[in-house]
Image (cartoon, rainbow, N blue to C red):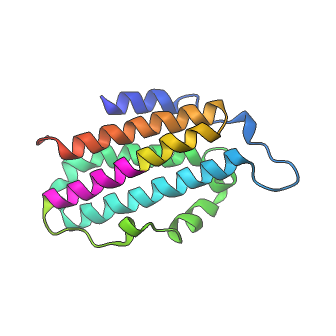
Amino acid sequence: MVSVASATVLVGCSADPDSATSGGSPSVSERARARAARDSRGLLRQYDAVLAAHPRLAERLRPLRAEVAAHAAAFEEGTATATGSASATATGSASPSASSTVPADEKAALASLAAAERSLADLRAKALLDVPGELARLLAGVAAAGAGHAYLLTKGDR
């Protein structure tokens, strides 16, 4: 269910005609895209850490992780981050939750991922108010997907 919505949002929304810069400084759109890509890469690291600590969760987490990777790629597409600066930026900008240790309990580990997804969805929902159309739509769709991920991570067994 979430994957269909994410795929729909990602198709056609990754290019932002308002992201052109003048004078060599990044536009608001480019900065927002770079931050969104960096945040998605940080979330990917959190998924990877939970998967490394709890391999039994792989079947449950693999589809959600794949969507987060697709979101990062959509934000990176067509920006300077796509040329390689995204990985350098993402590596050096771990959020406090990304750098913390993974809970030993699987349920707590899932709850920590859900909290990260919710927090990032909220951040993106606020950010979409400050960017032009296509990027706002992409942020909105990815925020909705993140909220869906948070729900799936905390509700019942899959």
Q: Residue furthest right?
A: 23
Residue placed at 12% from the left, 41% from the top? 156
Identify the image quadrant of the N terminus.
Answer: top left
Residue placed at 74% from the left, 37% from the top? 18
Q: Is residue 109 part of the magenta span, yes or no?
A: yes
Residue placed at 36% from the left, 65% from the top? 97
Please tell me whether residue 16 is drawn above or below residue 88 in the rendered image. Answer: above
User: Could you say where residue 33 lies in the image, as x and y percent from the top left?
Assistant: 61, 48
Q: In the depicted view, which residue is nearer to us: 28 or 92? A: 28
Please tell me whether residue 151 is drawn above or below residue 87 in the rendered image. Answer: above
Location of residue 46 by image quarter: bottom left
Magenta part of the protein: which range?
107-119
Identify the image quadrant of the C terminus.
Answer: top left
| Left or right: 2 in relation to 81 | left
Residue placed at 44% from the left, 39% from the top? 143
Q: Is residue 8 part of the magenta span, yes or no?
A: no
User: Could you say where residue 137 lies in the image, as x and y percent from the top left?
Assistant: 55, 31
User: Could you say where residue 59 lies in the image, as x and y percent from the top left?
Assistant: 20, 48
User: Could you say where residue 141 lies in the image, as x and y percent from the top left?
Assistant: 47, 33
What's the magenta bit mostly, secondary-structure-wise? helix
Please tell me whether residue 50 is drawn above or below residue 125 in the rendered image. Answer: below
| Left or right: 83 in relation to 68 | right
| Left or right: 154 in relation to 7 | left
